[in-house]
Image (cartoon, helix red, strand yellow):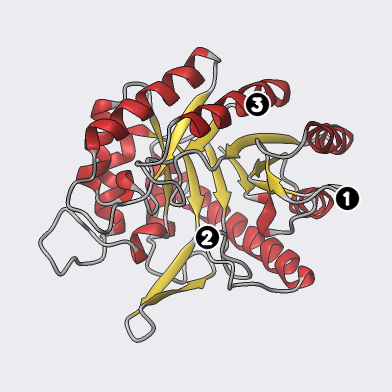
Amino acid sequence: MYLTGIGDEAGACIDAQIKATTELGWKSIEGRNVQVGDFPKGNFHDVPDAAFDAVVAKLEEAGLGICCFGSTIGNWAKKITDPFEPTLEEVARAIPRMQRLGTKFIRIMSYAVREDSDDQMEAERFRRLREITQRFLDAGIQPVHENCMNYGGMSWRHALELLEHVPGLKWVWDTGNPIFNADRSKPKPWPRQDPMEFYQKVKPWIVHVHVKDCRWDEDKNDADYVYPGEGDGQVRPVLRDLLAGGYDGGISIEPHLAVVFHDASVTSDAGREYSTYVEYGRRLTRMVQEILTELKNPA
């Protein structure tokens, strides 16, 4: 087991991401968005070659790796009715960069939920995900699907259906996402998902974990993000269950306290982003150490 984090929540600049990771004593970053020099910010698989080269040089100098690409492939901003070719171009750009960095995992999704239709075009989603998954597997890379605002995140039933139809796909479990996602396998009005129920159903496929935590505010109709263990994401029980079973994958922080990746209206100054990220990492480290101690010395 190792601890890591989605680096752009510490800061867009690769220097801030490296500094935060080093301060926490971690050995790798989960790469999502990155900015270096005069180049504009972009996803790891989208920045220009010169920018990527500069990022690689800084990582090598710091002795850090990239454990996972947090790609935009099939994410909540992409529609299943969009042409497939741009997705395949993202895959083609990601593979050589991941191979150069020795990165094992790439986070993907299953396209946005069709809110204006009862037809989710499952057959087309499965077809695309099978091709995406196979291309990565052929390159020695493991794609991992996240339970987020996408088809596979609509409920645990949708997740299992996706896994059944896409051989070789694995799962990255996000502890916070069930809190603000409706369980669309149930009759309307949809209840919020049960995070422990969803986790238990996809547990056999989990090879990576995102830790965020939040509470649902009915008045605001939105989530309030908090430090790990302070919300309704069942962070401690999930991690305890995983570690008790010998889980040896990554546990990656995604605080959302200072910035929300999919909500551009949530912003903060760079200093607050950095300090919040480091504090979040420290709290998660303490939680994991406490769990390991409990498991080693049961009452």
> Which residue shows up at 72% across the image and 26% down it?
101
Q: Which residue is mark 3?
A: 98
Choose top left, top right, bottom left or bottom right for residue 231. Answer: bottom left
Q: Amino acid at mark 2?
A: His
The quarter holding residue 84 reads top left
Label 3 neighbourhood size at 10 Å, few (<14), some (14-19), many (20+)?
A: many
- Real-space CA distance between mark 3 and mark 1, rounded to the nearest whole angstrom: 23 Å
Q: Work out whether 251 lies above or below 222.
A: above
Q: Nearer the viewer, residue 240 or 4?
A: 4
Which of the two discs, 2 and 1, sits closer to the camera?
A: 1
- Residue 180, by quadrant, is bottom left
Q: What is the x, y in percent for residue 197?
A: 24, 52
**Nearer to me, 28 or 142:** 142
Q: Secondary structure at mark 3?
A: helix
Q: Position of residue 36 (x, y in %)?
A: 83, 47
**40 up-or-down from 162: above or below:** below
Which quarter of the rendered picture does the N terminus lie within? top right
Image quadrant containing the C terminus: bottom left
Disc 1 marks which residue? Answer: 38
Q: Secondary structure at mark 1?
A: loop
Residue at image coords 56%, 64%:
260
Which residue in the structure is indicated by mark 2? 262
| Pointer 3 or 1: first along the chain | 1
Q: CA distance from mark 2 to mark 1?
A: 24 Å
Q: Foreground: 228 or 146?
A: 146
Residue 87, x across and y down, in percent: 49, 33
Drawn side of residue 117 relative to residue 39, left or right: left
Check disc 2 and report its element: helix, strand or loop.
loop
